[in-house]
Image: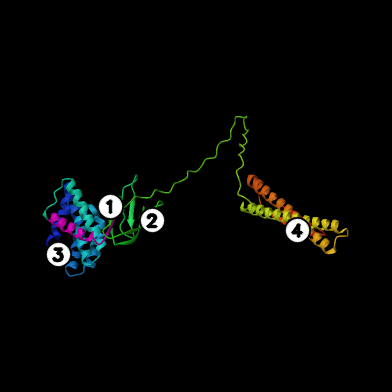
Amino acid sequence: MWTRRLSELAFAGWLGLVASDARAEPASPASDDALAPYRERFKQGMDLYEHGAAADAIAVWEPVYRDLGERRGYRLAYDLGVAYAALDDAPHSADRLQAFLNEVDSRRERGEPLGAAVTKEESDARARLARLATVLGRVQVVPGPRPFIARVDSGDPHGAGAIAWVTPGRHSVTFDPQTPDERTIAIDVAAGAVLELLPPAPPATVPPQTPAAPSLSAGVGSTRPPAMESPALQPAPFPPALIAVGGGVTLAATVAAVALEIHASALRDDAVAEQARSGGTIPAGDRASFETARTWAYVAVAGAAGLGALTAGLATWYILGRAHGESARPTAVVGVRLDRSRLVLDGAF
């Protein structure tokens, strides 16, 4: 049924195409001859379509449609939409039918007569799109503050406001393709949904800065020295948590030193009291216990003092390094050695 209808309306459609252009400017033999190759190619595609070769017909018609453009070739857009439908290519069919209806609406708004054939094709195109709207998704880019071109996947580029029909799923939208401002985003479109997009802002360009001319206020040929900038805080030479750990260890060592000193003092007091009661000498075992306790107390006191000094040094290093900066982080070397009965802490910062 559609094949017969296409055959009957083919030449009428092309005559209407020429007539619509003739309304804009006077017809001439030259302009009529310019369309002659398109008519022959359209007839060639029609023959292919009537023999069931819809794909071959599309291959002939698409270049003609691109040469004519959406305005002059809108009747061919309808034929392409039906041919794509014969191949079950729903997105391309919807795109061409949408282009046909866009031009029909524009001509109706301008008050141009459409004719009975176009009205019938319009009714059929709207019915087809209504069915496709339930199984396909639509992408429409909202006009922005500046003109731009958008392309969905590898389809045709369109201006702002145009609708692109896509299968449900993930797609890419490229703004201003093949230009320095080209940007691509990924989108997900559901069946029956209309996804409206705002174009992303173009990348900001930083204008080149022109060096300031030297000041001559101090005399001819003299320049004013640059103002001294206040030093900024530099990155910390090490995590501040290290100071907190050092403080905690120092506190624990101090508590242990106090406990050991109390224990040594208690042993000494007990030994002295026992000597006073017995009137003799302090037993060798008690004396040895006291000496051992006192040694450990001295070790603990020295360790607490050394850890306190180390923590204070780390805090000073952190503050000074943060305020003035350092070309290289110094390495702290700390050593602990036992000199006879004394605990000696050596350090270099």
Amino acid beneath label 2 = Thr
Q: CA distance from mark 4 to mark 3?
A: 100 Å
Image position, residue 247 (x, y; %): 66, 52
Task: Look at mark 1 in the image and give the residue it sits on.
Answer: 162
Amino acid beneath label 1 = Ala
Q: Is residue 43 visible?
A: yes
Amino acid beneath label 4 = Val
Residue at image location 61% in from the left, 53% down from the top: 241
Q: Is label 2 or label 3 in front? A: 2
Amino acid beneath label 3 = Trp
Magenta residue check for 132: yes
Task: Look at mark 3 in the image and give the residue it sits on.
Answer: 2
Q: CA distance from mark 4 to mark 2?
A: 63 Å
Q: Quadrant of the N terminus?
A: bottom left
Task: Look at mark 2 in the image and give the residue it sits on.
Answer: 184
Q: Is residue 281 above or below residue 218?
A: below
Pick whichever of labels 4 and 2 is earlier in the sequence: 2
Task: Look at mark 4 in the image and give the residue it sits on.
Answer: 336
Residue range of the region highlighted in magenta in the rendering = 117-140
Q: CA distance from mark 4 to mark 1?
A: 79 Å
Evaluate if marks 2 and 3 touch, with contact meaning CB atoms under 8 Å apart. no
Q: Is label 1 or label 3 in front? A: 1
Between residues 17 and 340, which one lies in front from this camera angle? 340
Q: Secondary structure at mark 4?
A: strand
